[in-house]
């Protein structure tokens, strides 16, 4: 039995390997990211299950397209993020902070798939079978075709899959899995590369959907080489504060659907509950008569969501003013402060300014500029914005209000929740349907907006 051993240095960021240590990775040009690994591979071992069949080149125009076979999990928020359900043979990577709800969501999805008659295998490398059963009892999951196993050895898992032949496999988590063919520790670059590649070959060769749970680093990225995100079909991130009830599921890569959709969930004793109308949740505790508050309609894929932007401006105690931003783009807020100072003449240079998007939501699109500016101006002037007013528009450096997309959907979402006053860019007025312009005011400049509101 021939066994070859060698020492390599692998980059923990991009997976680049080199036979000698270097201060800077040639692959991603990051410093101090190369880690020493001792790799021992058994040359006589057969990869076995998951080997892709050899393929012959085909003329592109002659390739026949079949409709993707999808299976709905019954969790509408989850299915929408995936593009309408899980695709057979796809590999889905789910990342998020510890305790955010990754295992809970996948256990609920596994149970829903098993109730539809699909055989599902849940591989828990971090918990025992009894621990998983305890969570399943709390969630009320008891699918007859849902199998649970506590195993972290890849070869053992592949053997179970070959016997059971499930249609969906959940690996919780990929950082715990290891292959006997490698001598490095679980979670190392070489182990992640090997296990992920073999699970990918399993999915593509057997039309089995594979879910991978990934740990994240302190920077918020999925731990391991970037190659891990490249080889999978879909990358999902669970966001939200661990000690808050609401969670946001976001797709950052999806080969079978859009990447700008989000799903909103609420953590409860019975598991993750879907939130069909997030706007009501984000505005439920809003006090409209308080200065420094404005409502912004942000687009998340095809769904408009209303969120509250709060701002607080107070005289700076020390020489350098303090700026803190949560839930919005910090650099964009700094630009808007400069516009208020230069174009409007507001004295912000000696003011501490704090901006927060409530509910843990995140707003990054330029359409939120006008709402952020109104919240800051409201706090500076100590005058509240009309609680039934919504401001939509991008603010240019010259103080002009620029048009935004999806203006019709944003206005309609506001009307559904009882808002009756809208400030929109003048250019967008012509795109609104006739009969829906009541209460809609078109503006060209920031001075016009402030004069209209205050």
Image (cartoon, helix red, strand yellow):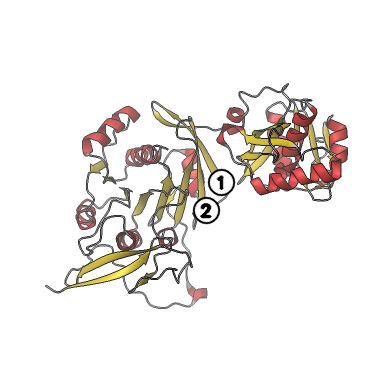
Residue depicted at x 80% and y 45% = 339
Residue depicted at x 37% and y 37% = 104
Q: Using a 10 Å C-alpha cutoff, classify the residue at mark 2 as few (fewer than 14 neighbours), some (14 to 19) or many (20 or more).
A: some
The answer to whether residue 192 is seen in the rendering is yes
At mark 1, the secondary structure is loop
Residue 111, x across and y down, in percent: 33, 38
Residue 228, x across and y down, in percent: 40, 59
Q: Is residue 258 left or right of residue 133?
A: right
Q: Is residue 395 left or right of residue 331?
A: right
Q: Quadrant of residue 72?
A: top left
Of residue 407 and residue 98, the one placed in the foreground of this image is 98
Q: Are marks 1 and 2 in contact (CB under 8 Å)?
A: yes
Residue 427, x across and y down, in percent: 83, 47
| 314 versus 398 height, above or below | above
Of residue 5 and residue 75, the one placed in the foreground of this image is 5
Q: Using a 10 Å C-alpha cutoff, classify the residue at mark 1 as few (fewer than 14 neighbours), some (14 to 19) or many (20 or more).
A: many
Task: State the mark number for residue 257.
Answer: 2
Q: Is residue 142 left or right of residue 373?
A: left
**Between marks 1 and 2, how big is the CA–CA gap?**
9 Å
Residue depicted at x 39% and y 25% = 269
Q: Is residue 148 left or right of residue 403?
A: left
Residue 123, x across and y down, in percent: 27, 46
Where's the N terminus, which quadrant?
bottom left
Mark 1 — residue? Answer: 261
At mark 2, the secondary structure is loop
């Amino acid at each position: 039995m021939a066994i070859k051993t060698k020492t390599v240095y692998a980059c923990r960021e991009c997976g680049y390997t080199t036979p000698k240590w270097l201060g800077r990775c040639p692959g991603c040009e990051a410093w101090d990211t190369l880690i020493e690994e001792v790799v021992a591979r058994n040359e006589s071992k057969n990869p076995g299950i998951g080997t892709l069949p050899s393929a012959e080149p085909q003329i592109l125009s002659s390739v026949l397209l079949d409709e993707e076979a999808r299976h709905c999990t019954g969790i509408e928020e989850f299915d929408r993020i995936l593009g309408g359900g899980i695709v057979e043979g796809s590999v889905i990577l789910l990342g998020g902070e510890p305790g955010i709800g990754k295992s809970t969501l996948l256990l609920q999805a596994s149970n829903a798939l098993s109730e539809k008659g699909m055989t599902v295998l849940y591989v828990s490398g971090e918990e025992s079978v009894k621990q998983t059963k305890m969570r399943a009892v709390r969630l009320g999951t008891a699918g007859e075709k849902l199998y649970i196993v506590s195993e972290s050895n890849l070869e053992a898992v592949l053997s179970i899959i070959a016997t059971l032949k499930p249609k969906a496999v959940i690996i919780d988590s990929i950082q715990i899995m290891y292959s006997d063919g490698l001598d490095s520790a679980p979670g190392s670059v070489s182990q992640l590369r090997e296990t992920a590649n073999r699970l990918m070959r399993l999915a593509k060769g057997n039309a089995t959907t594979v879910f991978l749970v990934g740990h994240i680093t302190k920077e918020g990225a999925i731990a391991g080489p970037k190659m891990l995100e490249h080889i999978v079909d879909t990358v999902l991130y669970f966001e939200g504060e661990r000690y808050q009830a609401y969670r946001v599921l976001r797709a950052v890569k999806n080969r079978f659907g859009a990447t700008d959709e989000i799903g909103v969930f609420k953590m409860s004793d019975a598991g993750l509950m879907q939130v069909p109308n997030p706007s009501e949740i984000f505005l439920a505790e809003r006090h409209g008569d308080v200065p420094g508050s404005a409502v912004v309609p942000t687009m998340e894929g095809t769904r408009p969501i209303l969120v509250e932007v709060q701002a607080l401006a107070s005289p700076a105690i020390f020489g350098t003013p303090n700026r803190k931003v949560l839930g919005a783009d910090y650099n964009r807020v700094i630009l808007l402060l400069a516009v208020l100072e230069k174009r409007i003449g507001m004295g912000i240079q000696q003011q501490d300014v704090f901006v927060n998007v409530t509910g843990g939501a995140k707003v990054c699109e330029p359409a939120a500029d006008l709402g952020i500016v109104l919240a800051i101006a409201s706090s500076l002037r100590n005058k509240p914005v009309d609680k039934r007013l919504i401001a939509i528009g991008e603010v240019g450096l010259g103080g002009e209000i620029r048009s935004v997309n999806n203006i019709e959907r944003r206005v309609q979402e506001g009307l559904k929740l009882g808002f009756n006053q809208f400030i929109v860019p003048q250019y967008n007025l012509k795109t609104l349907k006739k009969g829906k312009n009541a209460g809609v005011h078109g503006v060209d400049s920031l001075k016009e907006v402030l004069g209209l509101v205050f």
